[in-house]
Amino acid sequence: MSGKRFLISGGGTGGHIFPALSIAGEIRRRMPDADILFVGAEGRMEMERVPAAGYPIKGLPVSGFDRKHLLRNVKVVARLLKSMRMARQILKEFRPDIAIGVGGYASGPMLKAAQKAGIPTLLQEQNSYAGVTNKMLAAKARCICVAYEGMERFFPKEKIVLTGNPVRQNLVECDATPEEARKAMGMDANRKTVLVIGGSLGARTINNAMIDGLARLGQHDDLQVVWQSGKFYDEQCREALAAAGVKNVVQMPFISNMDMAYRAADLVVSRAGASSISELQLLGKACILVPSPNVAEDHQTKNALALANRQAAIMIPDAEAANRLIDTVIRTATDQAVLDTLAANVAQMALRDSAQHIVDEVEKLIN
């Protein structure tokens, strides 16, 4: 089955890019001579991350609808029409055997054009609450790979396959012990460790709660905290930490060795994006989730509730984080029984080998 051509479209955030790259990696592993082309949104993260991973990418001038300022959508519609024209041209030149959509507005024009051209399409939906783009494309998709049960609320039941979300492979393959990982991070090997991550851009609410809680965290010698603030908030967080003079908190704008950071942690504080949750499930990490309120259809709250309702995570709404987050972190991190329960329950929700299962479905469609 040589020389097949695969088009993968989507992006806008890391949550869409990591699964897309995992799927591409699995295709390449099975079919070394496969031709893979990515299509993303101009100016977004994928335009850097995908070439860095060794794949070609074309950018469309597409952008999301502005629900607050409706007049701005005149430009959005113009960009959408231009993107549709470019998508048809990409299809004509690349002639894919299949188009794979991983969600995000970037995949809309590309997958729509593929469906109109009679090219089989497969969708991957990462969230427990389906995105607008995937809902729009579902009727003509051949297969829809999902990460949560109960998705027939959004999609035709006969097209759904429960595969889980692919995650960065190095996270799962890391075999360091927690003690080794803490040493590698420059931390005390034997202290309870909390990892605080606000996503690649950082999260204002989580960072502000951390700044306000530094003195309280500093009183707990039995704890240590690794705090990824995001580049945008780096200076503010670094200055606050220096002013507080707290010795058991290490702050950095970005953690490059996430595999070690996860391995080191007894407890993780995170937003509730689909990729983050899949990572926490696969690694069996006790976690406190603070869903971002700035996402379409509040899907992060729905993701977090899917765990919290099964005692697989503690959820703190964004609006309550300022008052509740640090006390909850201290209380949870110092209670081994609670950590053990959360870790066991979240691990039970993991769906393993997701990229393999998705590419199994891809192969069925192109044969």
Image (cartoon, rainbow, N blue to C red):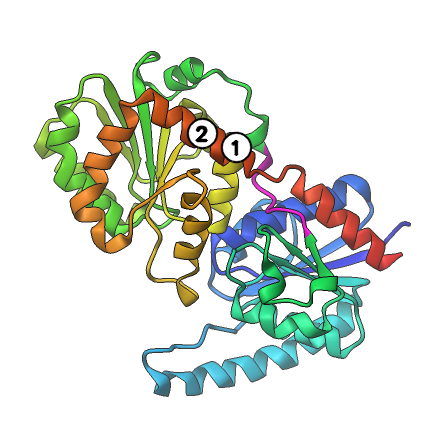
Residue flagged by tag 1: what amino acid is it?
Answer: Ala
Look at the image and tell me whether residue 248 can be seen: yes
Q: Position of residue 265 (x, y in %)?
A: 38, 26
Q: Give, as a single range, the part of the protein colored magenta.
A: 162-169
Query: Residue 91 vs residue 33: left or right?
Result: left
Q: Position of residue 295 (x, y in %)?
A: 39, 62
Q: Position of residue 363 (x, y in %)?
A: 82, 52
Categorize mark 2 by other alpha carbons within 10 Å: few (<14), some (14-19), many (20+).
Answer: many
Q: Are marks 2 and 1 in contact (CB under 8 Å)?
A: yes
- Helix, strand or loop for disc 2: helix
| In the image, residue 306 lies in the stretch drawn in magenta | no
- Helix, strand or loop for disc 1: helix
- Spatial distance from mark 2 to mark 1, Cα to Cα? 6 Å
Query: Residue 301 vs residue 143: left or right?
Result: left
Q: Using the image, determine if residue 273 lies above or below residue 77.
A: above
Q: Which residue is mark 1?
A: 347
